[in-house]
Image: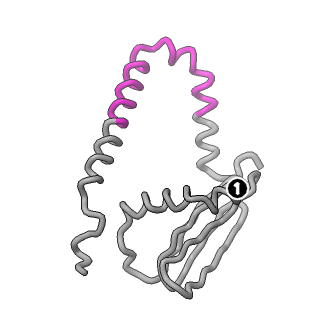
């Protein structure tokens, strides 16, 4: 099962929640989870319906701790798991990796590849910095919600 993953689906019919996965109990109990979730709250928009479903696919070879933090009291959750024997994302990444491995000598001597890669990394890095700077000036709570 080289290309498999464990698919976890958490759904709630009574409101929104934060859903996190961790490889150790200490990191679930630590403030890192709270810190990461607070970063996510910056970009969060209000969910229009009361039914929320969140999904994630993780490696079946590691121990996983599931953390659910509720926004409201008395929320009920449905947690579904199933094993995907072939995950297409893993297969595609494997094929790309093998192709790059066998073409490494040709790519290393190619000037076009060298400059295209450098420019691409520079543009993506600049866009990430730009999004970070712009997000600091945006209001935390959208004005459409009112009070």
Residue 49 is situated, as x and y percent measured from the top left of the image, at 41, 81
Q: What secondary structure do most residues of the magenta stretch adopt?
A: helix
Q: Residue furthest top?
A: 109
Which residue occupies 51% across, 18% down?
107
Q: Residue furthest bottom?
A: 74
Which residue occupies 25% across, 63% down?
139
Give the residue pinned by disc 1.
Answer: 24
Q: Which is nearer the eye, 95 or 12? A: 12
Horizontal side, residue 72 vs residue 2: left or right: left
Q: Is residue 147 magenta?
A: no
Residue 98 is situated, as x and y percent measured from the top left of the image, at 64, 30
Q: Which is nearer the eye, 13 or 73? A: 73
**Quadrant position of the C terminus in the picture:** bottom left
Horizontal side, residue 91 vs residue 114: left or right: right
Among the 4 quarters of the image, the one containing residue 29:
bottom right
The local crowd at label 1, few if under 14, some if 14 to 19, many if 20 or more residues have their Cα within 10 Å, is few
Q: Residue furthest front?
A: 31
Q: Is residue 32 above or below residue 140?
A: above
Residue 2 is situated, as x and y percent measured from the top left of the image, at 74, 46
Q: Which is nearer the eye, 66 or 80? A: 66
| Image: magenta residue range | 97-125
Q: Which is nearer the eye, 21 or 118? A: 21
């Amino acid at each position: 099962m080289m290309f498999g993953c464990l698919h976890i689906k958490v759904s709630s019919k009574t409101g929104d929640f934060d859903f996190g996965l961790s490889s150790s109990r200490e990191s679930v109990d630590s403030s890192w989870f709270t810190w990461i979730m607070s970063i996510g709250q910056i970009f969060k928009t209000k969910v229009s319906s009361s039914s929320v479903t969140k999904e994630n696919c993780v490696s079946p070879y590691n121990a996983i701790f599931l953390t659910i933090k509720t926004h409201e009291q008395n929320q009920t959750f449905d947690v579904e798991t199933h094993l995907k024997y072939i995950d297409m994302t893993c297969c595609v990444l494997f094929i790309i990796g093998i192709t790059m491995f066998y073409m490494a000598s040709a790519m290393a001597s190619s000037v076009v590849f060298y400059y295209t890669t450098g420019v691409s990394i520079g543009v993506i890095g600049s866009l990430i910095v730009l999004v970070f700077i712009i997000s600091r000036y945006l209001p935390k709570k959208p004005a459409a919600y009112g009070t």
